[in-house]
Image: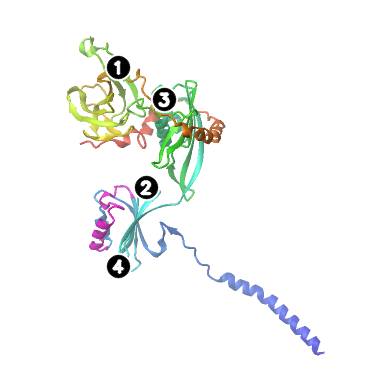
Amino acid sequence: MRKYWGAILALAILISCKEDKPAVEQEIAQLPVAKPIVKRFGFDFDEYNIVQDTVKNGDSFGQLMLKNHVDYNKVITISEKYKDTFDIRRINVGKPYFILKSKDSLERAEVFIYQNDKINYTVFDLKDSAKVYKSKRKVNYKEREIGGVIKNSLSLDMDSLGVDYNVTLNLADIYAWTIDFFRLEKGDKFKIIYDERYINDSIYAGVTPIKAAYFEHKGKPIYAFPYVVDSLKSIEDYYDQDANNLRSTFLKAPIKFNYRVSSRYNLRRRIAYYGYKVRPHKGTDYAAAIGSPIVATADGTVTESRRRGGNGKYVKIKHNGTYSTQYLHMKAQKVKKGDYVRQGDVIGWVGMTGNTGGPHVCYRFWKNGRQVDPLREKLPSAEPIVDSLRAAYLEHIVPIKGQLDCIEYTLIEEKTEEEQEEDLITLNEPNGTTQNQPNNN
């Protein structure tokens, strides 16, 4: 009988456990769930009172710190000890920043985060002994393939494909020595492979350099592949399908985009203003909007940067013992005599100084001390890949070339002249040639 009572008791305990289990699960479910800590720039923003703003005209690092109860001696320490990390005199108007303040009655700034750009930022840790360091936000890369056929102009057609304007500029830089983008023809084709950068998979943060490109101009195909030819000095250049360097000694034009050749080199030119008398024109005029950047067409040393007579404000560059170039009618110069400039560096901006009927740069070209027509000169090219690297390069480009060949062309709508003019104005405003204008002083 006793054994039966034991079995009954065991059964009762089992039933009791089954009945109690849902109650236990319900109690567990009602327990508070810990909120996950989400950090921004390496800090838990919930631990601070946050000030988010942008640098305004008249703001200085010192003023921002003192206004937020940071000790003056700490500001001095930062300015002296960490000037190589960040020069506090160079905070720029419009740049966003965060101030992380203590959650007490003092609300003293404990961290200042300055966003250099969408990816890079500088942290001023103001707690205890101040320290300053640079860091980067996590970036994801999304590869993009683009193919198009020229219907309007390169900049307009790339824009219609939703391509970042910087990709257009990069493509123009790659082919600047081999293709005159002013002379593109309808039906010319292009393909590009590049990466877009995103922060947190959603915030667009620009593009990487072009990974590979193809341009077909007047039926001639020209591939472009970046390749490191000197790993110690990290020297990289773009080469074609035959390992030839796409870079030449001189650029095709002193303006990258949105220009037209308004007057060619002509020793027998007659001008109505002078009664149709012969007035030799020993330069090539590139008409463009006032403020458009003018670039050095080759490496060299600035021998003149001044204003004189009908030339207006101009810059002259000596490239070597054979070649020199000159750029006239500038609105302002960016370089001075003695400066060494690299090919593609901005040296000034298009203007109307001196004798000129409209905004343009008169580009003059000397060879062995005599002015010549640069558009008719056969200019020297850069060296191809050395023989010791040639086989490795040709093997390296095989899969990339195959990827380019498989990109399909997207149909681009042809626009009227009025639509093209409107689009060019839009392109110039945020990203184009007007963004680097000098001050009007």
In the rendered structure, which segment of residues is drawn in magenta? Answer: 69-95
Mark 4 touching mark 3, by CB under 8 A?
Answer: no
- Name the mark nearer the viewer: 2 or 3: 3
Residue 232: x, y in percent? 40, 42
Question: Judging from the image, what secondary structure is the residue with disc 1 in?
Answer: loop
Q: Which residue is mark 3?
A: 179
Pick whichever, 65 or 383, lies toward us: 383
Type of amino acid at the residue the image marks with label 3: Ile
Type of amino acid at the residue the image marks with label 2: Asp
Q: What whole-number distance in Å separates the C-alpha atoms at marks 2 and 3?
A: 33 Å
Pick whichever, 213 or 395, lies toward us: 395
Q: Residue 239 got which mark? A: none
Q: Which residue is mark 2?
A: 117
Mark 1 touching mark 2, by CB under 8 A?
Answer: no
Label 2 crowd bin: few (<14), some (14–19), many (20+), radius 10 Å: few
Label 4 crowd bin: few (<14), some (14–19), many (20+), radius 10 Å: few
Mark 1 touching mark 3, by CB under 8 A?
Answer: no
Residue 348: x, y in percent? 27, 32
In the depicted structure, whether residue 297 falls above or below residue 233: above
Type of amino acid at the residue the image marks with label 4: Leu
**Residue 126 is covered by the magenta coloring:** no
Q: What whole-number distance in Å separates the C-alpha atoms at marks 4 and 1?
A: 71 Å
Question: Judging from the image, what secondary structure is the residue with disc 2 in?
Answer: loop
Question: Judging from the image, what secondary structure is the residue with disc 3 in?
Answer: loop
Q: Which residue is mark 4?
A: 106
Q: Which residue is mark 1?
A: 265
Label 3 crowd bin: few (<14), some (14–19), many (20+), radius 10 Å: some
Disc with the residue nearer the chain's start (4 vs 3): 4
Type of amino acid at the residue the image marks with label 1: Tyr
Disc with the residue nearer the chain's start (4 vs 1): 4
- Name the mark nearer the viewer: 4 or 1: 1
